[in-house]
Amino acid sequence: MSATSSKETGKEILGFQAEVKQLLQLMIHSLYSNKDIFLRELVSNASDAADKLRFEALSDPALFENDPELKIRVAFDREARTLTISDNGIGMSRQEVIDHIGTIAKSGTREFFSRLSGDQQKDAALIGQFGVGFYSAFIVADRVTLTTRRAGLTAEHGVRWESTGEGDYTLETVEKPARGTEITLHLREGEDEFLSDWKIKSVIRTYSDHIQLPIVMKKTEWKDGMEVPTEEDETVNKASALWARAKKDIGDDEYREFYKHVAHDFEPPLAWTHNRVEGKQDYISLLYVPSHAPFDLYDRERRHGIKLYVRRVFIMDDAEQLMPAYLRFVRGVIDSADLPLNVSREILQSSRDIEAIKSASVKKVLGLLEDLAANQPEKYSGFWKAFGRVLKEGPGEDYANRERIAGLLRFASTHTDTDAQVVSLKDYVGRMKQGQAAIYYITADSFAAAKHSPHLEIFRKKGIEVLLLTDRVDEWLVSSLPEFDGKPLKSVARGGLDLGELEDEAEKAAHREAEESLKPLVERIKSSLGERVKEVRVTHRLTDSPACLVTGEGDMSAHLERLLKAAGQPAPTVKPTLEINPQHVLVARLNGETDDTRFLDWANLLFEQALLAEGGQLDDPASFVRRLNALLALLPADN
Ligand code: ADP
């Protein structure tokens, strides 16, 4: 950061973080068609600042400085062509201005920028996900002046920040008697519509009606055909907490706008649930499911989405005790009438009231999702694409709701044979064959590896559906979901395959016969492969492939072993079982092989190709290639 300063004025010129410049350019272009939203963003910040003040004042009432009536004021000056939004909220110190306004204090910012493509249309969609907040002022202003003083500091600790949004900003110390933040927008050429009382009020009513705080403007009157402000104030918005109002009095648009405020999201939500609970506990919850994943959904440091209020007083953001991690995408407000105002994160952790609110809220969200899945499948599919991988963490995290969460899961399967995750466990169970005892699945590193796995051959032949699991979280999911609807979930690549009633007597007899007759071959392969395998046996899983690898019933799957090792985590090396296909011509050839060296090559090749087919890696690829070439060289030259 470059900084020049002059001692007399304390004025400093500082450079924006490189990303900020880039962000501003992108934002001005992509949000211009929807420019009114800058006012919503600034009002939303002012409201948050008031919430923070009210909260800090709980333990330090002096912060109110004899000015306890929190409000937001919007004013314009036609001559100066400025629009000013001011609040008497918490304000900012000099350092806070540098940290919050000169930098983008969001985790994952770098990652966000690395995803920008330079294609304006594509990037415009991303900017909505990122949320630009304060900077949206530059859509309509070519200069922005922010003057602020933190509550509790004396008047001479005011700070003035000013920028044209072109690379640097100035910072100077000023006197600011009134606590809070005042933002003045010097409107760009052609943005005069924001110098109209009517226009501003209509934007406020459209986007900020739900703001709990009064938004006041000077009343105007008509004089000589001109609209002129009077000395009288009027409150432009409803100025009551939206969530505390009766459901029937809240329109869908109001719910949507409120969402954008609480979630700092530019896109409307997918669905919401609003509940007032009375009885043993009194609280209100308003919970939203967003329509798209935030760019940092998988960032462990990311904020949780629930704001906790106690009797309309904001207590904290990101109250992670109120929503389990697998529902971390949920946004909204919980307002309790019972909790003490001085409730801390530590208290929340051990509070039974909180536990009860959380558990009821989780049920509301699951109910909302079930309703979407049943009645608005298209919306649900959008939800699944955005958040399915997060919801898959649910069965492992929330034992009590395991079956309900399982009902919400969607998978790719051999029924559709596409990578679209659209099959529910209920659909699957409804299609199970007569005599089928288990829900079958395969886990693999990629959809192609799953779909073409040799393990599926017998299932395809018999028309038995298999779920194709290729998300990283799937291994964790299946390990925490042993059954659904009383049917066990079973990996097709693990343990001895017992198809039970799905096989007829003739097939079973043929299998026993092959086992008997190939015993010597099995022994010979086993001694050739030695330590590479745990066991060798005759299979009935395969129709086309010569061999496949199987994991022991209690062993870690080969896929999970690879995932762990790739992540640098310790994982035991599990020896697989090699199963050979008695029907396959290669196996027949091997059975007749008398040359011991050649037999050794063939046996190893059989093992190595089985390993490759399931997405594994060879320890010694060069030897594999040598063996393959040696065998190819045996092919007759004339064909
Ligand atoms: P966001 O609101 O999503 O965090 P913004 O860019 O809108 O992002 O604001 C960045 C930060 O600047 C806020 O989180 C807040 O700390 C601070 N800020 C913005 N406006 C105000 C205000 N009116 N009063 C106090 N702090 C503010």
Image (cartoon, rainbow, N blue to C red):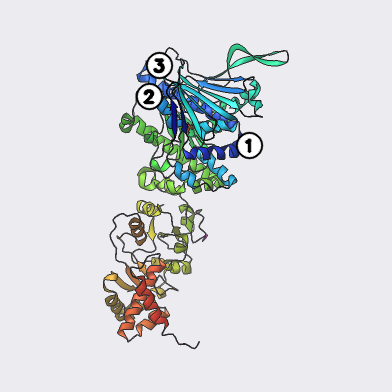
Q: Which residue type carries mark 3?
A: Thr
Q: Residues within 10 Å of mark 3 (few under 14, many from 20)?
A: some
**Front residue (pair 8, 272):** 8
The tag earlier along the polypeptide, 3 or 1, is 1
Residue 202 higher or lower than 230, as above or below = below
Quarter of the picture containing the N terminus is top left
In which image quadrant can residue 224 be found?
Answer: top right
Disc 2: residue Cβ within 8 A of ligand 1's nearest atom: no
| Circle 3 SS class | loop
Q: Is residue 196 left or right of residue 464?
A: right
The tag earlier along the polypeptide, 2 or 1, is 1
Q: CA distance from mark 2 to mark 1?
A: 45 Å
Q: Are marks 3 and 1 in contact (CB under 8 Å)?
A: no
Q: Indicate which disc residue 338 carries.
A: 2
Disc 1: residue Cβ within 8 A of ligand 1's nearest atom: no
Give the residue at mark 3: 154
In the rendered image, residue 91, in percent from the top left (x then y), is placed at 44, 23
In the rendered image, residue 520, in percent from the top left (x then y), is placed at 29, 81
Q: CA distance from mark 3 to mark 1?
A: 42 Å
Q: Is residue 136 left or right of residue 5?
A: right
In the rendered image, residue 33, in percent from the top left (x then y), is placed at 63, 36
Q: Indicate which disc residue 33 carries.
A: 1
Q: CA distance from mark 2 to mark 3?
A: 36 Å
Question: Which range of residues does the magenta coloring cover?
Answer: 414-421
| Circle 2 SS class | loop
In the rendered image, residue 351, in percent from the top left (x then y), is placed at 32, 30
Residue 1 higher or lower than 48, as above or below = below
